[in-house]
Image (spheres, grey):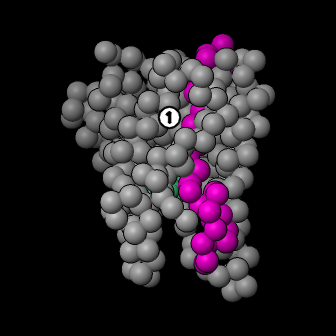
């Protein structure tokens, strides 16, 4: 069934965001790929178009509110509306808390936490203004619930995403806008492929049922399901897409 909605996907140039862009496009939605990696983002858009679907790329640094506002404006200028805002861009830093450089801590918070704040505010205001009963989805993580050594800033950012999701859902419900979070576990994307400590990747893998990494397309499927009208009762919720990731 062709849906013809408009979905903005931040971090859409790679991993989970890229697979989500492909998923929405294949289902007939128009996709706005947002990322600060322009080359990779344009490649995603080119593939979507080659497959006969609609997409644009908007270079965006989610840590800057003015970029995210401009992103939302561009989506509306191009396609007339936004139905889905997927606040997904994220980074990881592996540093023990007492060795943490504050600049590294702030980088993680600026992208993973403030990037989501910016997306909720910019997209939420636009949906309210246009009277659109849309869905805002934020990427949390099992690390928003479970502590693991060496990822202090990441835990702080993802814990915040969980509570921001619940709080924003309460406030946006009167406008018919849902706010939900997806919490992946260990997903086979560049973010973890980049970890030099391969022991950590093996350890994460061993915590997933079946001792494997989850595919980014599996998380994309979950994100897509959460945007459907059939998911209308799921609001303020954190949906685990973690294949039973155990602490
Ligand atoms: P990835 O590294 O493949 O993709 C992240 C994307 O975000 C990249 O395209 C990157 O260019 C973009 N990005 C980073 N900073 C940005 C900024 N300031 N502005 C715009 N774009 C920016 O990683 P992955 O795994 O696809 O990550 C997506 C989300 O999933 C992140 O929020 C991550 O924390 C979360 N996650 C990932 C898990 C995993 O095991 N891969 C597990 C749990 C959560």
Residue nearer the viewer, 123 or 156? 156
Residue nearer the viewer, 194 or 76? 194
In the image: residue 165, left or right of residue 9: right
Q: Is residue 8 magenta?
A: no
Q: Secondary structure at mark 1?
A: strand
Q: Is residue 65 above or below residue 199?
A: above
Q: Is residue 214 visible?
A: yes
What is the magenta range?
127-155
Residue 208, position in %: x, y? 41, 60
At a point 55% along the width and 41% down the height, the residue shown is 239
Residue 164 occupies which quadrant of the picture?
Answer: top right
At a point 69% along the width and 86% down the height, the residue shown is 99
**Mark 1 neighbour density, 10 Å: few (under 14) some (14–19) many (20 or more):** many
At a point 50% along the width and 30% down the height, the residue shown is 226
Residue 220, position in %: x, y? 40, 41
Q: Which residue is mark 1?
A: 8
Residue 89, position in %: x, y? 53, 51
């Amino acid at each position: 069934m062709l849906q013809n909605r408009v979905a903005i996907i931040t971090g859409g140039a790679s991993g989970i965001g890229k697979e989500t862009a492909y998923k929405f496009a294949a289902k007939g939605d128009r996709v706005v790929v947002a990322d600060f990696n322009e080359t990779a983002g344009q490649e995603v858009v080119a593939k979507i178009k080659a497959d006969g679907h609609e997409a644009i790329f908007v270079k965006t640094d989610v840590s800057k509110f003015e970029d995210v506002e401009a992103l939302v404006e561009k989506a509306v200028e191009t396609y007339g509306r936004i139905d889905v805002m997927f606040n997904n861009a994220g980074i990881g830093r592996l540093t023990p808390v007492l060795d943490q450089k504050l600049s590294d801590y702030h980088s993680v918070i600026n992208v993973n936490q403030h990037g989501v704040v910016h997306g909720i505010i910019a997209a939420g205001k636009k949906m309210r203004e246009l009277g659109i009963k849309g869905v805002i989805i934020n990427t949390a993580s099992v690390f928003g619930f479970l502590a693991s050594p060496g990822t202090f800033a990441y835990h702080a950012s993802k814990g915040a995403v969980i509570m921001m999701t619940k709080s924003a859902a309460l406030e946006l419900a009167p406008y018919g806008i849902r706010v939900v979070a997806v919490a992946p576990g260990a997903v086979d994307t560049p973010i973890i492929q980049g970890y030099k400590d391969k022991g950590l990747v093996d350890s994460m893998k061993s915590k997933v049922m079946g001792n494997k990494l989850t595919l980014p397309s599996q998380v994309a499927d979950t994100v897509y399901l959460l945007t459907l009208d059939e998911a209308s009762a799921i609001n303020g919720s954190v949906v685990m897409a973690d294949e039973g990731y155990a602490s």
